[in-house]
Amino acid sequence: MILDPFNAFVEHAPDALSGRGPLSGITIGIKANIAVKGLHWTAGMALFRDRIATEDAEVVARLRAAGAVISGMLTMEEAALGAKTDNPWFGQVHNPHAHGFTPGGSSGGSGAAVAAKLCDAALGTDTMGSVRIPAAYCGVYGFKPAQTAVSQRGLEFAEPSLDSIGPLARSLDLLDQVARVISDVGDAPAANGCAVLADLGGVECQSAVITAYNRASAAMGEVADITLPHRLSRVRYAGFIKTVRFMAQHFTDADPALLSDHLKRLIAYGPRRSDADWAEDQSVLADTAEALRQAVATHGVLLLPTAPQTAFAHADATPSNQADFTCLANIAGLAALALPAGFSDYGLPVGVQLIGAPGCEAALFDRARALDAKLCAYRPPFFTKEPNP
């Protein structure tokens, strides 16, 4: 049994074995909304507490075929809707860099398990940043494939058109290896430029995030400023509404006693949205997606902070702008890669992300490697006590 003081794993595979292949001997934890044959497939929900997967998700089957050791199921936010991984049914996950602090959500167990070296890599799911935000908060690497590049068979959805299964790892090389097994990594050429969002779209960021982002921007060389047609907070809210509208329908017949009050409050936003407001939401999403696709087609990659802040205490309220940057790749159906970029004065990791076009994933990894070599920002956790900001 793995010693896990962070509550990253919710279930360990009793007979995890390695096979032959490029990932032979590599241990991989799986977020609990992805099916692993013979293990509980809960999606972090009391509603599915007793559900046992009868077959592997496509991505898990690919990992097994590549020789990976499937270690078990990782703790996550209830229904993959949340930002802390403070699950009312399966417990709170702690950030290995600061006990009592969030590892991010909804793939918090995935980020914590990788950072704490409880497994070599992990799978998470990303609806509006749920792989990349835990990667940033936990100081590891995370990749969100384009939705069209990875099978979603065996995934308990949050929102099908936004969801993407993606890996987290402690190195870009292993992240790339796992990504190539579970998804289609295209080698089409991409433009050599780099775009940045003028004034970061007006999103308020912590000083440590600004410092790390400015350093990353300088390391990318010449960059081009772009603007988007809508405020990022408006875009993120439209994506949230799209997600909870799907969930409200998906769980319409669920026993209310098996949904937490927090989840019910979030889901309720969807049905309350008027038809006129929902039509406006769709227009916001479409306009933003088109602008982002044009930006990466023209400039190759878009550089952004991963999250506007570092990890925060579980006792604190979730910042409303947490997914303002990460939601963009999901809304536009783009690939995105998060990497460590620095630390706050209190030892909490900071991340940046590169967003690129589907089919150009190999070029995206190449740009990330070049940036990573200049930043040299990966550092394993040195302490687990609460910092004193």
Image: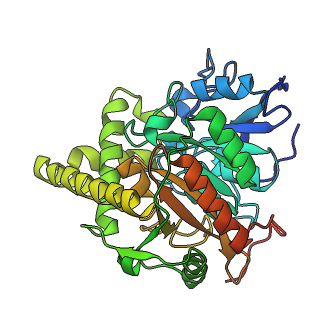
The spot of residue 73 in percent (x, y) is 69, 35
Q: Note whether 82 is above or below 26 in the view shown.
A: below
The quarter of the rendered structure image containing the N terminus is top right
Q: How is the image coloured?
A: rainbow
Q: Report how many numbered discs are placed on residues in the image.
A: 0
Say if residue 185 shows up in the picture.
Answer: yes
Q: Note whether 357 is above or below 195 in the view shown.
A: above
Quick one: 246 or 265, which is closer to the camera? 246
Say if residue 103 shows up in the picture.
Answer: no
- What residue is drawn where x is 80% and y is 66%? 384
Furthest-left residue in view? 276
The quarter of the rendered structure image containing the C terminus is bottom right
The spot of residue 339 in percent (x, y) is 64, 62
- What residue is drawn where x is 72% and y is 80%? 346
Dividing the picture into quadrants, the one containing residue 203 is bottom left
The spot of residue 214 in percent (x, y) is 55, 82
Quick one: 58 or 107, which is closer to the camera? 58
Q: Note whether 179 is above or below 343 in the view shown.
A: above
Residue 234 relative to residue 215: left or right: left
The spot of residue 378 in percent (x, y) is 75, 66
- What residue is drawn where x is 65% and y is 33%? 181
Dividing the picture into quadrants, the one containing residue 40 is top right
